[in-house]
Amino acid sequence: MPDRTRRTFLRLTGVAVAPTALSRSTAQSQTHEDGWEAVDTPTQRTLYDVTRTDAGTFAVGAGGVVLERTEDGWTLVTESGPAGNGNNLSSATTTQNGERLWVAGASGTVAEYDPSTESFTSRNAPDDVTNAFTDIAITGSAGDATIYLVDASGKIHISEQNGEPGTWTHTTPGSGAEISAVAVSGSTGFLVDQNGSIFKTTDGETWPEVDTPSFDETLTDIAMRSSETVVLVGSSGMVVIGSDGEWEQESAANTALHDVEVEACGCVHAVGASGTVLHRTGYDTPPLRTLARWFDLWTQTWPTGQNLHAIALGHPHIAVGASGTILER
């Protein structure tokens, strides 16, 4: 089974939001023609990420809000974050065995959540780093995980010992530009920064830059199709696929894309501004000379008018975004 990673990014201010009573987000529409349905949620705060554990699905967002999908619908885990300080949470992921949820965000916020005990373990400010963490990826199982954090200062922070204090290394792979996203599977990982530079590791320690063409926009997220092939999305709707040093890019949407995910079958899903949902059916990893056909098969729908920031694939697919929006399909 591939390691579970999280590849989403949205620039956050890092300003803490004071805890307040949450208003419920009420779905404004019925099931959309493409199968997406807006569901009620216990918040109107923007949700920046969504991920699955064996215990259920979780979403995180502004002011530190954490939501869980239960048999009774979406419920509140915390309205003010793991430490109760209201720091925005930008990203979430799970350990490989699905037993733990990890969250990260503004002001060095990092925490591990155990759904079985409903408790958080703080890993805040590793080695006193209080940068805004923009994304998190995990390999390994609960209690024995390797944690990858990237931040707005262009650094990647790695702990091979479950985030324990004193176990972190800190590296600046490129020029110090803000890192948008990181994706890791096994010992292979990729990250992309705001300059459009892509870096790859095969040992978890060194991150040489990958030779790519100049991209025409800011790349916002990256997902691994295989150990060699990645899919990226950008700020004006561009989708990029790269394999074995060859790259193709296509304008697949007319709005900014914030998150991209790839299913085991090869199906690709992306979400973005103004409720954009992109979908591409599965493919066997092709020689890049066949990619023109691959790009022709994108479909684009708008099941909501709210900006969407992340998508989790499964049964059902779940997309989250502004004003507490949650869509299920």
Image (cartoon, rainbow, N blue to C red):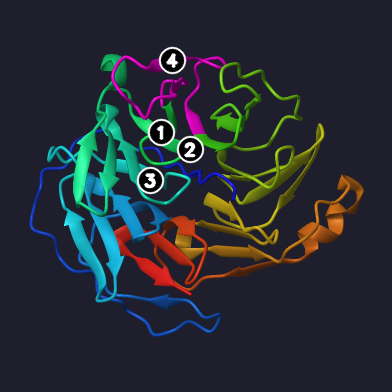
Residue 224 spot, x, y in % from top left: 64, 44
Residue topped by disc 2:
140
Residue topped by disc 3:
92
Q: Secondary structure at mark 3?
A: strand
Mark 2: give few (<14), some (14-19) or many (20+) Cα within 10 Å: many
At 39% from the left and 55% from the top, the residue drawn is: 53
Q: How many marks?
A: 4
Q: Secondary structure at mark 1?
A: loop
251 or 248: nearer the viewer: 248
Q: Earlier in the sequence, mark 4 or mark 3?
A: 3
User: Mark 2 and 1 residues: CB-CB less than 8 Å, in contact?
Assistant: yes
Residue 103 spot, x, y in % from top left: 33, 41
Figure check: 55 above or below 218: below
* Number of the front mark, 1 or 4: 1
Q: Secondary structure at mark 2?
A: loop
Left or right: 155 with respect to 64?
Answer: right
* Range covered by the magenta-colored residues: 152-180
At 51% from the left and 71% from the top, the residue drawn is: 302
Figure check: 174 above or below 197: above
* Number of the front mark, 3 or 1: 1
Residue type beneath disc 4: His
Quote the CA–CA distance across marks 3 and 1: 18 Å
Res 43 visible: no
Residue type beneath disc 2: Gly
Q: Earlier in the sequence, mark 3 or mark 2?
A: 3
